Image (cartoon, rainbow, N blue to C red):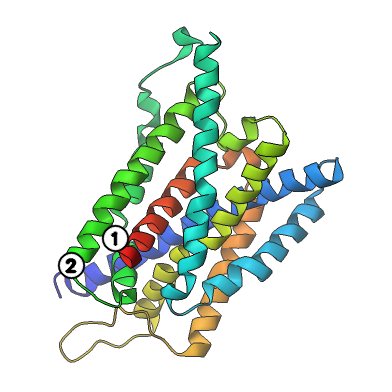
Amino acid sequence: MAYGKTGKLAVELSVIGLMLGTSMAFFAVINELGANLVQVVSGSSATPWQRALLLVMITTLGVLPLSLQRNMSNSMLWLLISLIFYTPFVFMLLARCLDTVSSGRLATPQIRLWHWSGITTCLPIFGSMFICQPQVLPMYFSLKERSVERMELAFKQAITISCTFYTIVGLCGYIPLPQTVPGNILATLPSTTAIDYVRLMFLFSMVMSFPLVVLPCRQAINTLLFEQQREDGTFSVSGDMPRQRHVIVTVLVVFSTMTVGALVQDGMITDVSPSKIYNQFTLQYVLCRFC
């Protein structure tokens, strides 16, 4: 109603593009983490076929069933568990950074506080993780007692907690390795029992957070291609659609982005972006349910 058909089209395409890109990044990281776990179990590097088979299994048995849920409240327990799993990752990086500083191995001259060349990469990440408009309406309609005040409180708390987590992960991932930070910070950690468990928990938390990425993408596709405008000029934003369409759109979104994510090379993976986006979304939803 505010921007007309052109504005509606721009919003839908933006939401679909953001969510599809995030889903691809999720799968790229899951693919790499799965390969690391295969190497731990078997003692040898995973072949391309083993990686592909494991990714298909994770997608079919984990990602797809969670993404097919029509009501986000059904994922409440899984989202809470994913937050609990994310916490050891944060504290592990903090402990590693403090050990580097206290032992005198910190390469202070190599630390640069500002890189102009990184602006085009970092600004979209900051914008997407702190704004999160695609999640507002799905979260609001999942509340039993809907009110703007509850949503506002939950979002303020989520942004505060997320910003704290982001700062710790960003600083503690960069300071120990200022010249050689890879896209996936977990790839720099030695293979110990504790770190392997953290990798496994991080893998689980990304899988369990997938519904928060698929839901707004599915809704935007529905309003873009199928849903008819109401008499008052508005469209439904509750995410309701026929079951057959719901299943087909979800399957297409999940497996198409899985295919692209599987083809992404290790050097192209940017773990910071998907982990921050899903952590922000998950926090907001969990706090909405508790506030």
**Looking at the picture, does residue 86 appear above or below residue 107?**
below
Q: Which residue is mark 1?
A: 133
Q: Are marks 1 and 2 in contact (CB under 8 Å)?
A: no
- For marks 1 and 2 on the same chain, the one whose residue lies earlier in the sequence: 1
Marks 1 and 2, how far apart in space?
Answer: 14 Å
For the point 17% across and 84% down, which residue is it? 233
Residue bearing mark 2: 148
The quadrant where residue 219 appears? bottom left
Quadrant where the N terminus sits is bottom left
- Is residue 92 depicted above or below 136 in this figure? above
**Depth check: 249 or 102 in front?**
102
Q: Residue at x 39, y 27 (%)?
A: 117
Q: Tell me, yes or no, if residue 210 can be seen here.
A: no
In the figure, 67 relative to 231: above or below?
above
- For badge 1, the amino acid type reads Gln
* Mark 2 secondary-structure assignment: helix
Q: Where does residue 243 sit, x and y in percent of width and height?
A: 49, 89
Q: Which mark is residue 58?
A: none
